[in-house]
Image (tube, rainbow, N blue to C red):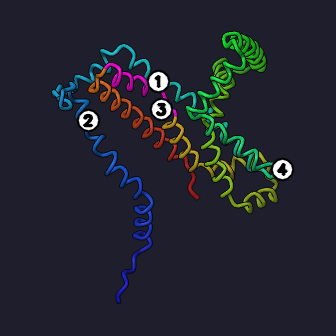
Amino acid sequence: MRTIRLSLKSRRALLGLAFISPWLLGFIFLFATPLLQSIRFSLSNLSVAPGGYVLDFVGFKNFKDALLVDATFNRILVDSVGAMVLNVPMILFFSLFTATLLNQKFRGRTMARAIFFLPVILASSAVAAAESAGLINLMGDASAVDASVDGGASFNVVSIVRMLADVGLPMAYVDYIVEAIMRIYEIISSSGVQILIFLAALQSVPGSMYEVAKIEGATAYESFWKITFPMVSPLILTNVIYTIIDSFAGSPVTQAIYQTAFKTQNFGLSSAMSWLYTLVIGLVLIVVGWVLSRRVHYN
């Protein structure tokens, strides 16, 4: 029996196809039809009929209404992109810093890693609702608690601003650092998956490289920037893409699209908003991926 011998390139292509086959099958059988249907909805005026729905073709009217007529969509979309620009560097820096610390050898390392991944589990809607209800029941007066927290937070922020201003940092950097401190809980809650990815990247770096660098007299700072950072740069690109998509997933834009579709029953306009939102996300991902891929070091 004659066997077929494949080249290394062909075997890798088949392996890649087998790897993406679950997603590809799911997209073809579950998402392709709704995706094409949403395009029809965005170009039509949908009216509910006794036997289902009726579509009246209106061209790009829904897109014009979303951009030029709707009072809030543009503002919410711009605010979401701005929040993403602020959040992604904060989350990436915190994730890489935390993963570097958790990669060190110390007692209780496994427990520390589990603690940093807990926010991913606790961020679910059911747990968040239970936490909110429990807090109100325990404290009794939620407004008094908020007032005390806000007062303490504002006092701490004033102290931090004064300290950073005395150092001589520009106010733009001071504002960014203060914003990161004020949103530390949100940053930690959004960093669990990124920490795990960076941990996997750090553990794949050969220890012999650090040993050689230490023999040559390199400091820990130089080892990080000359060895660790270049070796994990491919996963930095992965984490940036993941963080951008994750930040858009629960943004106010999705809530506005949901309300337009299921509260005002304007499915054509909501479909147009969805496609505009998708195009903006795709454009951001293409630009960021193109810029970062030119800086990525592949060993």
The one of 99 and 171 positioned closer to us in this rendering = 99
Who comes first in sequence, dot 4 or dot 3? 4
The residue shown at (68%, 56%) is 203
Q: Nearer the viewer, residue 178 or 171?
A: 178
Residue occupying the far right of the picture = 107
Q: Residue 284 at x, y = what percent?
A: 44, 35
- If you read the primary sequence from the N terminus, does the residue marked by circle 2 or circle 1 appear first? 2
Give the amino acid at mark 3.
Phe
Residue 5, percent from left and from top:
39, 80
Q: Residue at x 72, y 20 (%)?
A: 138
For label 3, the SS is: helix
Q: Amino acid at mark 2?
A: Ile
Other-residue count near label 3 (Cα within 10 Å), few / some / many at <14 / 14–19 / ≥20: some
Read off the residue under disc 4.
107
* Position above or below: 84 against 66: below
**Mark with earlier residue (4, 2):** 2
The kind of residue tagged 1 is Pro
Identify the residue under disc 1: 252
- Residue 51, numbered circle: none
- Residues 192 and 180: in front is 192
Q: In the displayed image of the protein, which residue is found farthest to the bottom?
A: 1
Q: Is residue 17 left or right of residue 224?
A: left
Which residue range is magenta in the image?
247-264
Amino acid type at image mark 4:
Arg
